């Protein structure tokens, strides 16, 4: 384990980089800006360790980043329609009705917590051990945000050989909504190439199609008979090359999948390096995003990426959940929000 200075912001805030694990073997690097994963080094079939997540080389690029590269996303992952939060319709008399006007930072939508989301905040190092680090953030209530003062903890832990666990917890002093996720872009080749040649298997019988603003529609669709069917392993290219209207709308995959199981719900592999990543999660949905605009999002940076160079597996609540029928995922002061995902790496 090590902690080093990563750089200083224009306002004089110091950013730290924490490394957990074996620096000569499997290890993970996290920076305090955005509680961001910058590196995950895993071995290929030849025993060669390479970084299999996309990231920048400088703090300056992370500060300008608009691709949410490896960052913790909050308070609300995904899009919320029209930047508005509907009233709490709970029958409980203990909770007052509220309406929050949220920033519209992507067309008519509130995306990933807005321009001052958790990805652009500086987190505090709470606890560090050889194989784990816990960061924390206090997100105070302010005009234009969701109710409540929120205390968030993000723990990154190597739980066993070649397994990274990322867990989020949050508590509030007022009824609110929380939906966190990690936005790492994975490319198991470790190279600057499209992930189209990677194989993917997802335990999901249903996915959500979206409207023109990429807000999930109310009724879920069966994946069967569509390019979104990953219930059996297939190449990502085979889906991206399909002329499905939803793929044209999003420029690729950028859709929520309703998971059928939590354990080993996603298996992602690279045919060349033989690296395999198995994901287990405790959330009902995963938003799979195939880096459809990575080339545009990294245009400002010294380090450039190509379209589809990485894929995100954003385990979370379905986007725009508070505006959907049957919504019941409010966080109350006496409760704790939990979200945990693990990534197990192996060689096929």
Image (cartoon, rainbow, N blue to C red):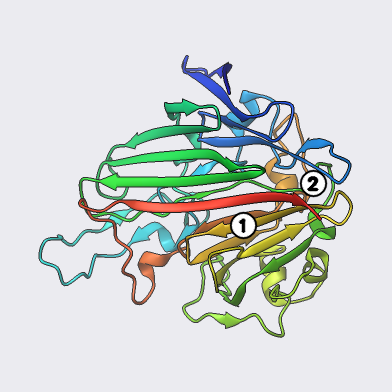
* Residue assigned mark 2: 306
C-alpha span from label 2 to label 1: 25 Å
- In percent of width and height, residue 94 lies at 11, 61
Q: Which residue is drawn at 29% across and 61% down?
A: 330
Relative horizontal placement of residue 147, taking residue 322 as reference (left or right): left
Above or below, 189 against 27 in this view is below
- In percent of width and height, residue 181 lies at 50, 51
Q: In which quarter of the image is residue 244?
A: bottom right
Q: In which quarter of the image is residue 85?
A: bottom left
* Secondary structure found at label 2: loop
* Secondary structure found at label 1: strand
Q: Residue at x 22, y 70 (%)?
A: 89
Kindly tell me whether residue 116 is visible in this rendering: no
- In percent of width and height, residue 253 lies at 68, 64
* Residue assigned mark 1: 279
Above or below, 76 against 139 in this view is below
């Amino acid at each position: 384990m090590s902690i080093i200075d990563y750089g200083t912001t224009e306002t004089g805030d110091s950013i730290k980089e924490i490394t957990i694990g074996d620096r000569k073997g499997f290890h993970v690097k996290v920076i305090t800006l955005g509680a961001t994963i910058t590196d995950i080094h895993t071995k290929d079939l030849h025993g060669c360790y390479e970084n299999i997540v996309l990231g920048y080389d400088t703090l300056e690029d992370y500060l300008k980043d608009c691709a949410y590269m490896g960052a913790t996303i909050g308070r609300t992952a995904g899009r919320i329609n029209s930047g508005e939060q509907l009233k709490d319709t709970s029958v409980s008399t203990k909770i007052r009705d509220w309406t929050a006007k949220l920033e519209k930072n992507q067309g008519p939508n509130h995306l990933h917590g807005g321009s001052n989301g958790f990805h652009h905040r500086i987190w505090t190092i709470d606890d560090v051990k050889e194989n784990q680090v816990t960061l924390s953030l206090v997100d105070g209530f302010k005009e234009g945000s969701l109710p409540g003062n929120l205390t968030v903890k993000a723990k990154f832990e190597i739980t066993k050989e070649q397994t990274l666990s990322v867990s989020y917890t949050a508590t509030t002093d007022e009824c609110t909504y929380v939906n966190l996720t990690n936005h790492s872009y994975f490319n198991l080749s470790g190279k600057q190439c499209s992930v189209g040649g990677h194989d993917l298997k997802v335990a999901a019988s249903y996915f959500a199609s979206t409207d023109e603003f990429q807000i999930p529609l109310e009724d879920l669709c069966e994946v069967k008979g569509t390019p979104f069917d990953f219930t059996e392993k297939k190449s990502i290219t085979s889906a991206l090359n399909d002329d499905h209207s939803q793929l044209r709308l999003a420029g690729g995959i950028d859709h929520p999948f309703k998971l059928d199981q939590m354990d080993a719900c996603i298996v992602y592999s690279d045919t060349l390096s033989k690296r395999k990543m198995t994901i287990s999660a405790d959330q009902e949905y995963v938003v799979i995003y195939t880096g459809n605009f990575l080339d545009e999002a990294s245009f400002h940076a010294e380090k450039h990426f190509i379209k589809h160079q990485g894929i995100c597996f954003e385990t979370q609540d379905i986007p725009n959940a508070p505006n959907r029928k049957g919504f019941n995922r409010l966080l109350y002061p006496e409760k704790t929000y939990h979200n945990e995902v693990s990534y197990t790496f192996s060689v096929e």
